[in-house]
Image (cartoon, rainbow, N blue to C red):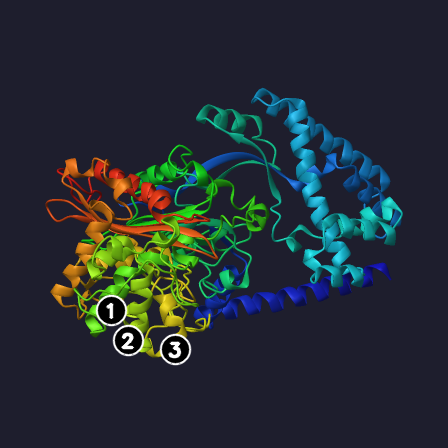
Amino acid sequence: MYEKRVKVFIGVSLAVLSVCLLRLAQMQLFAGPASQEEIDRIKDLWGRSRQFQTLRGKILDRRGEILAADLPQFQVCIHYRLSGFLDERVVLARFAAARVQDGNPSLYQVHKEVDDRRQELARIIDACRRLGLTRQEVEGKIKALNDAVWNARTFLCWARGSPDPNLIARYQTINSVPLSEALAHFESQYPDPAERSRRVAKVDLGDLPEISPDLPLMELRTEDEVFAAQLAFADLDEVQILPRGQRYYPFRSTAAQTIGWVGRATQPRDLKVFADDPLASYLKGEVCGREDGVEYVCESLLRGRRGEAVYDIDRQLVRETETEYGRDVRLTLDIQLQEQIEQRLLDPKLNPDYHGAPMAAAVIHVGSGDILALVSLPSYDLNIARYAFDKLRDDPNRPLINRTINRIYPPGSVAKPLILLAGLESGAITAQEPISCPDAAPPPGWPRCLIFRITQGRGHDSSWVNNARNALKGSCNIYFSRLADRIESSVLQEWLFRFGHGREIPLACPVPPAPGTVTRRLKQAPGEIGSTPISAATDTESFDQIPPLQRRERKMFGIGQGNFRVTPLQVANTFATLARRGRSQPPRLFLSPETPSAAEPADLPVAPANMQVVLEGMNAVVNERGGSAYEVFAASGLARHGVRVYGKTGSTERPFNAWFGGFAQDQAGRQIALAVVIEGGQRGGSEAGPLAREIFQLCVQAGYLGPTAGIPGT
């Protein structure tokens, strides 16, 4: 009986073998190409792909100074599957699973595994001690890493189970529920620690996109430390020496709001940008530019594409794609000039009454249109922004906002040169026609002159003939409120619009982020030049989209108040256009790649004689006795360098702000335009004026004005 069964088994085996041999012969002799293709397909399917890291492009200033760059940083990283054995909760979960006896290891096997793993951890701790850490430091780091992972797993376990609906309702979304409250509710659901641990241990690390399984244990600062660590951990699979690209901002808080920062790519709007490109799409833990700033706007340029090597099942290279490193972006900013400006504006000796107050300054090289500085204070350290985001977001002084382009202010009297030009061009007034500013209070509802309050009842008529030039020199509210009231609303608005108010200044990424997607641009506020706000959804590219201006508002627009709102960059751009004698040229922020010009330079329809009247008035503001900025600039020393300043002071009420706007010109015709605003300031001449004077002096020192002037960095 036994021999018969053996013969049957041998016969069946021979039959199966014969079928296999015949099929193999058929594949080799008759269907070779097709079968080989199928084999290659299967080998490829079961092959492996290795993707290489890329580096994010650098952000540079006009001189080539690095503003942002990826720096290689080597770290000793321990995998959680090993570090977790120092976490009693992980160990408890393994013992709890073993007791269930549903295919899990026995208690003896778990005991042995825990002992072996903890011996490996003891070796790692000793090696880290030899590399410069104390035992307490190493154990503390491992505990912190384990706690972070365990808490994340616990929160997800709670969220996937039966979370408290009252908590979710209180905090609106489940992810907004504080960890402490989620853990407290989870403990109330499962009082037994072993049961809690067993449930949490079922949460896979792959379900936690914010958690990397390789946890950084210590940073290696020198090549010798890297070599020593490689020797110490060579035989431990769970410990690796990994390079981590870390974004570094050498100038820390300087120009922070313009440069922007990076954070983990987790938002849907981030992930969809490169969703169709497997080598550019974001992997878990990778970073992208956070809104707002150049890091975000130029993501399509700064982010590179990973290289890839694909191997088949036989470890043969199938195909290889070269790594494309991110492109560099070069800005028009002069970071050293910007840093010096920020230091001066923060100097308590320069402006003691408003030291630490929020303020902004925009500086433009008039000839090229290059933005040399966009100062927004208070600022913040870009190197820690992603870790301190909640604190920065909740700061009442709003350091995250870029005040130069994304905060609007009533312009006050810095708008008066433009109001005067509109009046002269529209025929509402002539250069020599006076508007009386008597020694009497104005009618109810009309603005008073500052001089009337200061001198307790005097008007400008007692000082001069209150014509266009002199009214600008003395910043006469009576003159400009009545002048604006004479100008048709649409005509007044159109002149404001021509000079760049009521619309964004084009500061977009030089290259679209991806085919079919919207070009990113720095977030800006368009300002207000109508009686009602411009809708946030309105892209005011044409004057037809501007809301109308009611006549009753015109008198307030004449002194830069009412519903009139501007950004500091718009004001600086207005004075740059005046410096060019009416030639409009969009400011630019990007040098390389160069931004395609949204609008070519254009000569506005301004009569040279009318422009000359405005410039004479601005000159008198700074350089003649009785001018609202004369005392500030009289002893500035700028004249010794052949530099003449044309400017206008301004102040507003409700809200209070102090302004200075204008431009400086040297003997060779080189010009710098600027605008400065101090939130809470009350006197443009004595408070904002000194800051503007310091900025012009810094521009002389930097070589943008004066005998040695050029265009540094080009």
Residue 213 image offset from top left, x and y in percent: 62, 45
- Name the N-terminal-most of marks 3 and 2: 2
Left or right? Give the position of 709 relative to 4: left
Residue 442 image offset from top left, x and y in percent: 38, 64
Crowding at mark 2 (Cα within 10 Å: few <14, some 14-19, many 20+): some
At label 3, which amino acid type do we have?
Pro
Which residue bears the numbered disc 2? Answer: 491
Which one is in front, 460 or 662?
460
Crowding at mark 1 (Cα within 10 Å: few <14, some 14-19, many 20+): many
Left or right? Give the position of 155 relative to 497: right
Q: Please name the residue shown 67% across and 34% down the image.
A: 142
Which one is in front, 347 or 52?
347
Q: Please name the residue shown 40% across and 71% down the image.
A: 553
| Mark 3 → mark 2, Cα distance in angstroms | 11 Å
**In this view, 534 is above or below 149:** below
| Mark 1 → mark 3, Cα distance in angstroms | 17 Å
- Circle number at residue 548: 3
